[in-house]
Image (cartoon, helix red, strand yellow):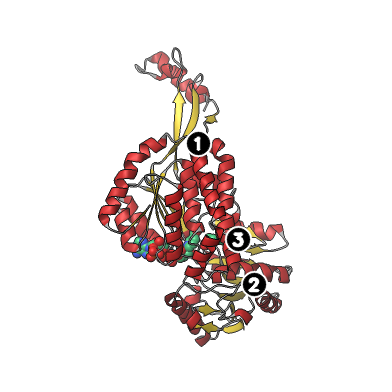
Amino acid sequence: MQANIDATVIEEVFRKQKAASMRLKQKTVQERLDSLRQLKEWIKSNREKIKEAVWDDLKKPPTETDLTEIYVVLSEISHAVKWLPKWAGVHKIKGYLPLVGSKSYIQMEPKGMALIISPWNYPFNLAIGPLVSAIAAGCTVVLKPSEMAPSTSRLIGGMVSEVFREEEVTVIEGGPLVVQTLLSKPFDHVFFTGSPAVGKSVMKAASEHLTSVTLELGGKSPVLIDKACKISEVAERVVWGKFLNCGQTCVAPDYVLVHETEADRFFEEMKVQVRKMFNPKDRGTANNEDYGRIINPQHLERLQDMFSEALDKGAQIVVGGEVDKAGNYMAPTVLREIRTDLKLMQEEIFGPLLPVLTYSDIDEAIAFINSKPKPLAIYVFTEEDFFSDYVLTHTSSGTAVINDCAVQFGHPGLPFGGVGQSGMGKSHGYYGFLAFSNQKAVLHQKTGFTPVRNLYPPYGFKKRKIVSLFLRFK
Ligand SMILES: NC(=O)C1=CN([C@@H]2O[C@H](COP(=O)(O)OP(=O)(O)OC[C@H]3O[C@@H](n4cnc5c(N)ncnc54)[C@H](OP(=O)(O)O)[C@@H]3O)[C@@H](O)[C@H]2O)C=CC1
Ligand SMILES: CCCCCC(=O)O
């Protein structure tokens, strides 16, 4: 069901879901599996509609939508369908001597009512991925997609109406004001994907009800390139990870630190790879199959400001630089001779600009990375394990990839999420299931004698001896 932004509608939706959430708590694993399978069938049957909606919103190449919006979600559903019986089952806990005779286990209980707030850059994937986890956990869901991706938002509303009962999942469209109204309600979990700035306001609002949150945020994810790498392979992987979705990707490389001895070769290879993957020949054509567009004129202007400032302060273009305002087009652009005080090096770029800096000493590079907030990802390219071990030991990030970029997002077995400014909580697979679950600890004590009785008062001489004995063996 799609609800308009009227506050009374939100009130009504909340009331219905509150009433349903206790009943749905008893929703069996089989019922949840049935819902996930129906969702999967809908997605597979409506692939073209999804691609059209995402094209309307972002001019995202249909094949890229297939890969990064549809395939990733189908993979998440298949993973959940395979493992849900185990995730939702009883997790037995090993015995504990002082409680000998008791049985302990963890019971996974749905948190209850979930609010999912999703961004525009992967408007299908980042709305439905968390929804899969919430359904698997047995939660009811209010889903608020981005109004900056209206076609995909409408498609999701229609899909939800067809697949779920209204009291199970409701899509409420709208922007910041709708979010603020929704956040005034005492949900049991809020799953937010977006910028750190908005993430803070979401967390603040949720704290009024002590509602748990998952914050999937962003940040400046560095690429660190060691000496003696296979530079053409490195360039290929950096170009793909960076310019996918025109760089509008939370796990995209934000800047590169390349060892000074490799810099010239790296720049040459970046030219080769950009031209090979995203040849500007299609620039401006409506049906470009390989490269998308910036979401709107405001974001294009933001990126142009960053770009102009960099050029004014000495940055040089290695490849790219073309901008076509009419088509919200900015070419995949690699820059060198970068000053560290540029806006480009202070704020998350979230677009197709890639500043490249050189370093001579690994500790200098690590100090630079650590001078910034902890990123969502760190990408290390090296042939030496000690190098990657050293970097991962001396830096902190939500995720880390050695010798590739962005692919960690697609592995349903890995927890995904940030740390510090780049986010809190994890998503995907079992970790997404846990985000929406209360891990209830259950201890079933035996009747009759248990060692615990020796700890009851009155604490006479004998009792004190027993307690000392207990302590001596700890
Ligand atoms: N960790 C991750 O998995 C990901 C993180 N991101 C991060 O998200 C950011 C880009 O996405 P973007 O959508 O622009 O992020 P925003 O934070 O601007 O928006 C995210 C969501 O919050 C809503 N929103 C926007 N402003 C407010 C506000 N003042 N109060 C309440 N809600 C608000 C938006 O609604 P509406 O859009 O309708 O205005 C949208 O639904 C980047 O920082 C990127 O790194 C992006 C993708 C994945
Ligand atoms: C490769 C797909 C990544 C999608 C989520 C993001 O990083 O914005």
User: Local crowd at mark 2 within 10 Å, few (<14), some, or many (≥20)?
Assistant: many
Q: Residue 257 appears at what percent x and percent y?
A: 61, 71
Q: Which residue is mark 2?
A: 258
User: Local crowd at mark 1 within 10 Å, few (<14), some, or many (≥20)?
Assistant: many
Q: Which residue is mark 1?
A: 29
Question: Quadrant of the rendered structure where residue 22 is?
Answer: top left
Along the viewing direction, whichever of 98 and 37 lies nearer the viewer: 37
Kindly identify the residue that appears in the image at 49 percent across and 47 percent down: 133
Vertical relation: 61 (above or below) 98:
below
Vertical relation: 471 (above or below) 255:
above
Question: Tag 3 or tag 2, which sits nearer the N-term?
Answer: 3
Along the viewing direction, whichever of 233 and 144 lies nearer the viewer: 144
Q: Which residue is mark 3?
A: 67
Q: Is residue 226 left or right of residue 439?
A: right
Question: Tag 2 or tag 1, which sits nearer the N-term?
Answer: 1
Q: Is residue 337 left or right of residue 450?
A: right
Element type at marker 2? strand
The amino acid sitting under disc 3 is Leu
Q: CA distance from mark 1 to mark 2?
A: 49 Å
